[in-house]
Amino acid sequence: MSRLPAAVLFILRTMIRWLTRGKVVPQNPIEEFQLDLEQPIIYVIPHASVSDLLTLQIACKSLGMPDPLEPQIFAGKSYKRVHYLMDNLGETLPETVRDFTSALEVHQQDDSHDAQLLPVKLFWDRYPGREKLDDIVTGKYPKPPGKLRKILQILFKGRENLVRFSQPVSMREMAQRQGADQRAGHKLARVARIHFSRMQHIATGPKLPNRRHLFEQLLASPVIRQAIRDEAAASNIELNLAQQKAQRYLDEIATDFSYQMLRAGDGVLSFVWNKIYSGISVNNAEAVRKLAQEGHEIVFAPCHRSHMDYLLLSYVLYHQGMMPPHIAAGINLNFWPAGPIFRRGGAFFIRRSFKGNKLYSIVFREYLNHLFARGYSVEYFTEGGRSRTGRLLPPKTGMLAMTVQAMLRGLDRPVTIVPIYFGYEHVMEVSTYYKELKGKKKEKESIFSLFTILRKLRNFGNGYVNFGEPINVNQMLNQLAPEWRDSINSGEERPAWLVPSVNQIADQLMVNINSAAAVNGLCLAASVLTVSENYNLPRQQLTKQMQLYLDLLRAMPYSEHSSLPEEEAGELLEHALSLGKFEVEEASLGSIISLNEKEQVLQSFYRNNVIHLLIIPALIATAMLRQRSLSKQAVVELVAQLYPLLQGELYMHYQAEDIPDLVERYLEQFTKMKLLEATEQGYQLAQHRRGRVALLASLAQESLHRYAVVAALAVHQPELERSELEKQTAACCQSLSQLHKVNAPEYYDKKVFSKLISLLKEQGYLDNRPESAQALYDQLAPLLAAGVYDSINELLNP
């Protein structure tokens, strides 16, 4: 291929460079795969192709990788740098096996060499194709495109080109494990073929089913047939009418994925994102690609903060070289024209409740089983709905339980849930959320609400998509319910271990989402201004406080999956001000930055996105601020007592046994930052840093207020039923918010109190014994500001 005249190669390369604007995945293979450029790199591509080879050459040059057209000197000999694996019939080329065998022999004789076999696949068209009956029976797939089709692909789809590098194979390790005979050469070729097969599946997904044929398959399944008979008997209707009802349910639920819609959507979203976002940051995507390459069944489980979430995730995955997942969308989004568009984009629709409708429940579950069985990745939001406060909502476990139930049908691939954290500097629905929390009825989605959303498209700042630590469901079930495999194909829908295991997996999922938090300038500024007196600060003080939080987070990283900005506080504040959410007033000693009445509320949403990262240092700061001087042991005991509540409320990843060491490290860091001074007795507040400590401490106050109100109510009225306790707690906190000007919707949100009261019951504080709640209140009282403490006593002791 490289023997073509240089002038011809130059012309072809120029044309390809002009016609293609493809993506390279991963963006930095050298760093992600830890490639050693001092050792030989052998590129392996599936088929001989001039266009593929020249496109690879262009990509390698931009990445600083060796030129695939240049020979390499290896063990004193000159070798080709590119090998083609298969002929056009899909058979492994004998000369490639010979070259692999020869290279293995060199490595076996001299282990100082370690050539890296790097599979590369180039996609000019990511259309998965339509499933035909022959494909289902024989498993045959299309041959590589001919020359004419390849030319047409370059002309019309060159802008979609994807150069996909895969995990390299070490020739030295292969020679040590497998030897260096021809059989080992064939084994290496098979490894490369598996790589290409999985790369194809990841980039294009399974073939698209014929929708009518799919419905016929599902309706003929024994489980749905039995459900139809049960429905006919229960509703006293004809069998064919019950079957028609099941078919209507399938038609309501099932996606009708279209690759053409995906391409069109990519073009539209690329335009929209470039128009409204300064940039989209993606972190830890390599872990997801690795899982897909290893053959895992992937379930994407993001937090849910905006309607942008599912659009952004599909867009990001497509540009990361993966086919977007099938998305479980609420039936409320199935309105014209959004519903048909979403359905063609991969959405399948789910009702808010299955209660009382057994046929619908079974049809939906069988459809979900089908998606898993066919190898489609799936996305669902475990919170159920969008968070109105910026905090994670308690998980709803229905979809997760159905995922585990699908595994019990004998799914032969490991199922892995990938948690995803979305971070935004502007959520377009945040004003609506505040109105709903104030009691306004949620507006039904419609074409008019769609136009309202489009009208709001403007400067949204940066967007963040962070992939968290994956949860291997098979491994977690092995720990939680070692006997779970006994239930595979047993016909038992709800084994005894199912509910408790799913609940624990769901809680771990929420913890992993929060562990992937993205910190940005807006949420840092919001974390300072929303707790400052009168919601304003001099610019210099705001910058210093933001820098304090940055320094603290950099010195004490919350998680390896979380992300921090590279910029310093001054630059981050400038960017935050450009978003138009803060008011700047010039004064004689410098500018004053403040929040107006509306933004006082709205900015609490962005603060709540990251408050779990700062709540432990905020609690320590509160103790030091109120007590002035404390021993290390006293601080440890305080945090250890309150941490279970914070952990349950904010889905934090620290374990109880981590707290002593964590507190000690924070105290040492506070001392390094000159916020505290070490004494013989322990630590004392550095008075010249009191203002900064006070602002940090204020981040913990709202949580402490809620804990104190519930504890005080339980002391004074231990006989209160749960519902009444929730009601009175919310009423008391609403009064406190008015008295002390706390403009934060979650301060008296019923969902927050419901979760809190459950946590207090689990911890034994609400066991109808006033002394249990009194012990908690006695610990909390010294941490409260004097005015709040007095207000709580007055409200509860009129």
Image (cartoon, rainbow, N blue to C red):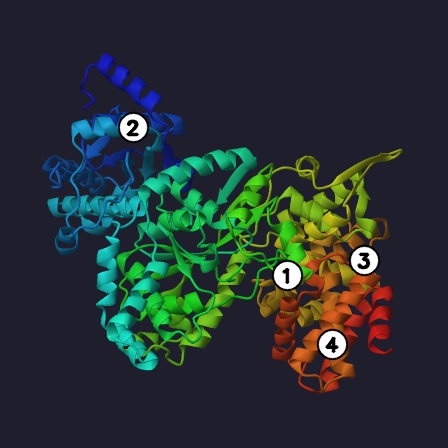
Q: Which residue is mark 3?
A: 741
Find residue 170 and report its horizontal and vertical position in percent. 28, 43
Q: Nearer the viewer, mark 1 or mark 3?
A: 3
Q: SS class of the residue under badge 1?
A: helix
Q: Nearer the viewer, mark 4 or mark 3?
A: 3
Quarter assignment of residue 717:
bottom right
User: Which residue type carries mark 1?
Assistant: Leu
Quarter assignment of residue 642:
bottom right
Q: Which residue is mark 1?
A: 662
- Quarter of the figure with the N terminus: top left
| Residues at circles 2 and 1 in contact by the CB criterion of under 8 Å | no
Q: Nearer the viewer, residue 331 or 117?
A: 331
Quarter assignment of residue 732:
bottom right
Q: Which residue is mark 2?
A: 156
User: Which residue type carries mark 2?
Assistant: Phe
Give the mark nearer the N terminus: 3 vs 2. 2
Give the mark nearer the N terminus: 2 vs 1. 2
User: Which residue type carries mark 4?
Assistant: Ala
Q: From this view, report whether residue 318 is shown above or below residue 785.
A: above
Q: From this view, report whether residue 637 is shown above or below residue 160.
A: below
Find residue 783 and report its horizontal and vertical position in percent. 79, 66
Q: SS class of the residue under badge 2?
A: helix
| Residue 180 seen | no
